[in-house]
Image (tube, rainbow, N blue to C red):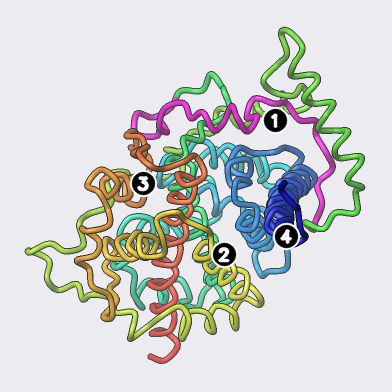
Amino acid sequence: MIICTKKMEYPLGTQCQRAQSQVMKVSSEKERASLLCMKALVSRGRLDTVSQQMAVHPQYLESFLHSQHYILHMDGPLPLPYRHYIAIMAAARHRCSYLVSLHSAQFLRVGGDPVWLQGLEAAPPRLRHLDHINKVLAHRPWLSGRAHIQALLKPGEQCWSLAELVQAVVLLAHCHALCSFVFGSGTDPDPSPAPRVPHGTPPGYCTCDAANGNATPLERAPRRRSLDSSCEVACLREKIQRAQEETDRPGSQALPHADAEEEEEVTCTEPSLFVTDPEFGYQEFARRDEDHFQVFRVQDYSWEDHGFSLVNRLYSDIGHLLDERFRCVAALPFPRGPDLRRAVWNYIHCMFGIRYDDYDYGEVNQLLERELKLYIKAVACFPDITRSPLPSALLTASDKIHINLLIMEARLQAELLYALRAITQHMIG
């Protein structure tokens, strides 16, 4: 006879409790991701592919959307049309048709002059003056220095204020880094008949797009000035469900009818129109014939000790929002451990001339396979010509997105460090 005692039942109860806790955790994460996607839908009137892919990591997506919304729409010295035009300039450096088209539409939506979309030469002189620092930060940020800052702040009719310049630099770095994520994750522009430049073609079709419903048409929704929209969740779910039902119908359109006019306006926006010196691109930092470039040592100027306080003082609250992004991406769970995450981060910074004295760079070669290193370098330094897929061995779809998020945030911080150091040199010089 087998006597079932409470002690015998206790381990089974514990397992049930743990299983229930895990199910509740997964459920809450899915609900959180769903809510974030719905907020993105309310904020922009459409659910873009970037948000859909980042929703795999909802805790990061929330931080990303918050900072991006603040930079593009909330308080700041730059007018809204200027912000989207600067985003166009930044995305054009990497021939990112997806972001150029997206911000062209938003530029018109906030009252921007359509003439400016004819090309950089049609923009006001103040915006054209940003072209050089845009080019340098996008491809060789170690070239940025005090002279670039002084030229933009030089007194005159077309000069920039320090607060305006800081916001512009943050926006440039944000969009440059986002280009790496767009191409690295295989986010293709919305279908359009517009020709594309040879080097602006993102990688091949990504199954993540189909899984996340990239082809799902979404109805236009009123734009909100805050991510914390007052629209009820039930209304949003009904909107999404109705859009999904329309997608399931035979012969459904890939694009909503309400956006047809907007798409017609932006399909002719060619990235090359906003680029000067197109041959200027990334070059190896460590070259024997260019020893005069000094290594950027984090011990001398770091985000935590220097960059954060400076950017937060000149551009209120953005330091906290960016720091939250860096912390979120560092806290994302990764099956191969924190050592690999740090190796990826430090490898990217090393390619841009940034070194950590307390890190053994031999770990990079030990932890990163050659194929993975090649992929990271391509996405970080040559995003617009990235065509090789991320090695799939032992990496899930979520892990691949995690790698691309690390590349984006490491590159963002690298550009900010160089730009903010140049601004600091100007202020104390």
Residue positioned 91% across, 39% down in the render? 235
Q: Secondary structure at mark 3?
A: helix
Q: Position of residue 213 (x, y in %)?
A: 65, 29
Q: How far separated are the C-alphas under marks 3 and 2? A: 21 Å
Front one among 14 and 290: 14
Q: Which residue is mark 3?
A: 379
By secondary structure, the bulk of the magenta-drawn segment is best described as loop
Please tell me whether residue 390 is drawn above or below residue 312 in the rendered image.
Answer: above
Crowd tier of the residue under label 1, counting other residues whose Cα lies within 10 Å: few below 14, some 14–19, many 20 or above: some
Q: How far separated are the C-alphas under marks 1 and 2? A: 34 Å
Q: Quick one: which residue is furthest to the bottom in this view? A: 428
Q: Position of residue 99 (x, y in %)?
A: 54, 42
Quadrant of the drawing holding the C terminus = bottom left
Res 262 label: 1
Res 328 label: 2
- Amino acid under disc 2: Cys
Q: Secondary structure at mark 4?
A: helix
Looking at marks 2 and 4 on the same chain, the residue that comes earlier in the sequence is marked by 4
Q: Secondary structure at mark 2?
A: helix
Q: Is residue 80 among the parts visible in the rendering?
A: no
- Amino acid under disc 1: Glu
Front one among 31 and 52: 31
- Amino acid under disc 4: Tyr
- Amino acid under disc 3: Val
